[in-house]
Amino acid sequence: MGTRRKLGAALAAAALVGGTYFATSASASTPNAPNSPTMAAATTPARVFAVVNSDGTKLRGKAVASTSRLSAGTYDVRFNRNVSACAWTGTVGFRTFGGSTGPAIITVTGRAGTNNGLFVSTYNSAGSLTDEPFLVVVVCS
C-alpha cells in the first residue's frame, strides 16, 4: 500500500474514532512526500461525552461547555453542539478506572429551554435524590 493510501486510511480511521474530519493536501512538486493533514472546516463531533463528579464538576469530556450541580442529585450538562436529535445514555460510576459505587439509579433527559443540554438525576437504591458521580454519552448521526 502506498504512502498516500496508508495516510488516507489512517486519517479515515481517526475521523471515525474521533468524530473529526481531516483533509489531506498533496504536494505537486514532490509526489512522494507524505501528505500533511490540514483541518477542514471546523466540524462538530458526532459523539460527545462528560464524566462528572458528584459535586457537579467536570472531570473530563469531549465538547463539554459546562457541568453543574443544581441541587441534591440533579445536574445540568451542556455540550458545544445541538443534542436534541441525538441519542444519549448515562451511568452512575466513579470517574476513575477502578472502584465502584453502591446501587444507584440515573435518569437522563433533554434539558428544557435549550438544544445543547441534558438534565441528569441520580438516586440511591431507596429512590431518594442523592449526589453520585456519573458519565453521559451522546451519539448523533
Image (spheres, rainbow, N blue to C red):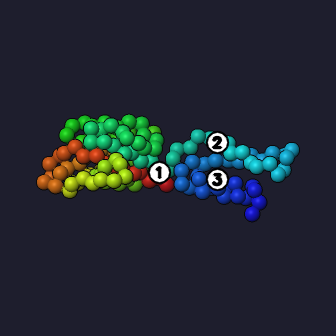
Residue 4 locus on image (x, y percent): 75, 55
Residue 107, percent from left and from top = 26, 51
Q: Is residue 83 visible?
A: no
Residue in view at x 29 percent, y 38 percent: 56
Residue of label 2: 39
For the residue pair 40 and 51, the one nearer the viewer reads as 51
Circle 2 SS class: strand
Tell me which label, 2 or 1, sits earlier in the chain: 2
Q: Which mark is residue 93?
A: none
Disc 1 is placed on an element classified as strand
Q: Residues within 10 Å of mark 2 (few under 14, many from 20)?
A: few
Q: Residue at x 39, y 51 (%)?
A: 137
Question: Disc 3 or disc 2, which is closer to the eye?
Answer: 3
Residue placed under numbered mark 3 in the picture? 11
Pick out the residue farthest to the right. Answer: 29
- Residue drawn at 75 percent across, 63 percent down: 1
> Is residue 131 depicted above or below 126 in this figure?
above
109 versus 70 height, above or below: below
Q: How far apart are the alpha carbons under marks 3 and 1? A: 17 Å
Element under label 3?
helix
Which of pointers 3 and 1 lies earlier in the amino acid sequence? 3
Between 53 and 114, which is closer to the camera in this rendering?
A: 53
| Horizontal arrangement in the rendering, residue 124 relative to residue 62 (left or right) | left
**Left or right position of 67 against 39:** left
Q: Which mark is residue 47?
A: 1
Q: Position of residue 110 (x, y in %)?
A: 33, 46
Visible residue check, residue 12 = yes
Q: Amino acid at mark 3?
A: Leu
The first of marks 3 and 2 along the sequence is 3
Calculate the distance from the C-alpha at mark 2 to the C-alpha at mark 1.
18 Å
